Amino acid sequence: MKRRWLSFALLVTLMTALVAGCVQPVPIAPPAESGAEAGDSEQAAAAAAGEAVQGGVWTRASSADASILNPILWSDSASSGVGGFFFPGLLGVDPQTGAYVPDGSMSESWQVSEDGLTWTFKLREGITWSDGDPVDAADFKYTYDAVASDLVETPRKSNVEQIERIEVIDPLTIQVTLKEVKCDALGDLGLGWLPSHLYAADFSDVMTSPLNEAPTASAGQFVFQSWTRDDNIIVTRNDSYWEGAPYMDGMITRVVPDSGARLAQLLSGEIDVTGLEPTQLTSVEGNPDITVYSANDDGYDYIGLNLANPENPQPGVDENGELIAQDPHPILSDLNVRKAIAHALDYETIINNVYLGRGYQIASNVLPAVEWAHDPAIQPYAYDQALAQQLLEEAGWVDSNGDGVREKDGNDLSLVLITNAGNKVREDLGALVQDQLGQIGFKIDFQAIDFGTLVERLLGQTYDMVIIGWTGLGSDPNDDAFWRSDFDTPESGFNFVSYQNPKIDELLKAGVSVPGCSTDVRAPFYKEIQQIIHDDVPYVFISGGVGDTGYRNRWAGIEPGQWSFYWNVHQWYDTALAP
């Protein structure tokens, strides 16, 4: 049964904080029905028997604050990491394999027509938002129509571009018809759903609704309680969650930019989980209270090179789909300069000293894990500073006055390199890149800045170089949103390096349009794409990596998978609640 008051563990936490003179926020436990005392006795008996009991608060640390809590507007993992607990999706992902499955999703099943164009989804019956309104096909259609609307500026436009129409056959049946075969169509249909009954029917308030910062309805494991900017977000148990209400009372996501502080809080028990950097693994090895989960990331770190003038960002195509000639970056638009950067970096030292061996050099944009599409014949750029200097000289950059900085036409070879503060790996990488590029005549101003500011500059295309990474790339090699010209859209597009290559546009389209979607037929397209991306150097690929997560093992029921850590969070329980 539900209880009328906070759990004992929460009261102890709150009283301890009061005594210390610094009150920490705690989730407000959902109100109880009558009979709470009997329920508490039942839970105590269950805890004594080693069974799951209700109560406890899971506290985690994030290096950055969320930016928005709207599934079609967010573009950062800090936002999706919280908002993902509120908004349901059409598809689930197997936590171990990454395959699309009905588990954990709104779909009971789906099928596709013989021509590969029409997908029909049968939805689960009886699921409601936390305010009692039904979750149904209307929410899916509203969400995707909103993405397509000219009133909504979103980086998710690629998710709808190949959709011909969405039909609500009945409240529990959705039919999606594509314009042409799209082999990764299921990936496009995985956005979280908006509660359509709370937004304007014409999408006029999607960009500005207060719900974007304080959602009032959830169909996920938790409901929103509060958000203190740059400090914490608190969520509480959703008692109406369709897979069963979580055992825990709630979850706190603290904003802790410094990685050392996050580690200290994990070791002290102030938080229950945090990502671990390579240098921190020795600090938790052998600790009986902490479990470390390690898995290959489905992503990579890279240095993005802005090919266009950051003082004059422009979209890649006009309203008719024709290429818009970009105002070139005064330095990075030169291929020889980009290749010089790629050859100037000592990748072995970077992986050994920065990643502490928890990484591997990659040559292009498709990871080895996607075996059928990855081309192992493409070799990463080799560390060769003599060649790097030769390339710069061929591009006209010379050190004429002997001050160690190359010049051309009276301008220094000077660039600003940015990354997000608090990520020690990226900060250490930035310092090393600054030094190694300085050795061949660059003047690099390296800045570690607030993550929110970084995202603004990145999407706004007002930067020179950025150390950043992609994660959650999935098991299909199609990453057209990063490279296609029409996704070069200042303020919202993921092609924020302003990369334009008509051949790449053509190959990316062909790779997802193969009739029957045979991987044998698709593979040559992606191998050619990898070679061209490698040769054009819009990114300097640094490393694929291994992700390490440390968590307090007083929590039971945790079964992390490579593709999802929180897939069964509603089944976790705090063993410390045992009497």
Image (spheres, helix red, strand yellow):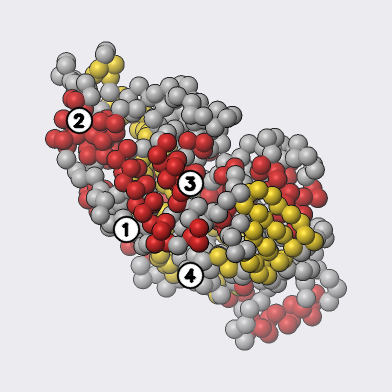
Crowding near pointer 1: few (<14 within 10 Å), some, many (20+)? some
Q: Choose mark 1 or mark 3, whichever is in front.
A: 3
User: Which of marks 3 and 4 precedes in the sequence?
Assistant: 4
The answer to which quarter of the image holds residue 16 is bottom right
Q: Residues within 10 Å of mark 4 (few under 14, many from 20)?
A: few
Q: Secondary structure at mark 4?
A: loop
Which residue is denoted by mark 3 in the rendering?
Answer: 509
Residue 358: give its label: 1
Q: Earlier in the sequence, mark 1 or mark 3?
A: 1
Report the amino acid beneath label 1.
Arg
Q: CA distance from mark 1 to mark 4?
A: 20 Å
Residue at point 29%, 31% (across, down) = 335
Element assignment for label 1 = loop
Q: Nearer the viewer, residue 14 or 183?
A: 183
| Helix, strand or loop at mark 3 | helix
Image position, residue 361 (x, y; %): 28, 52
**Mark toward the start of the polypeptide (2 vs 3):** 2
Going by the numbered disc 2, the residue's amino acid type is Leu
Q: Residues under labels 2 and 3: Cα distance?
A: 33 Å
Mark carried by residue 96: 4
How far apart marks 1 and 2 lie (CA) works out to 31 Å
Sort mark 2 into few (<14), some (14-19) or many (20+) by Cα contacts within 10 Å: many
Q: Position of residue 50 (x, y in %)?
A: 59, 83
Identify the disc placed on residue 391. 2
Nearer the observer, disc 4 or disc 2?
A: 2
Q: Nearer the N terminus, badge 1 or badge 4?
A: 4
Q: Is residue 230 above or below residue 548?
A: above
Image height of 164 relative to 344, above or below: below
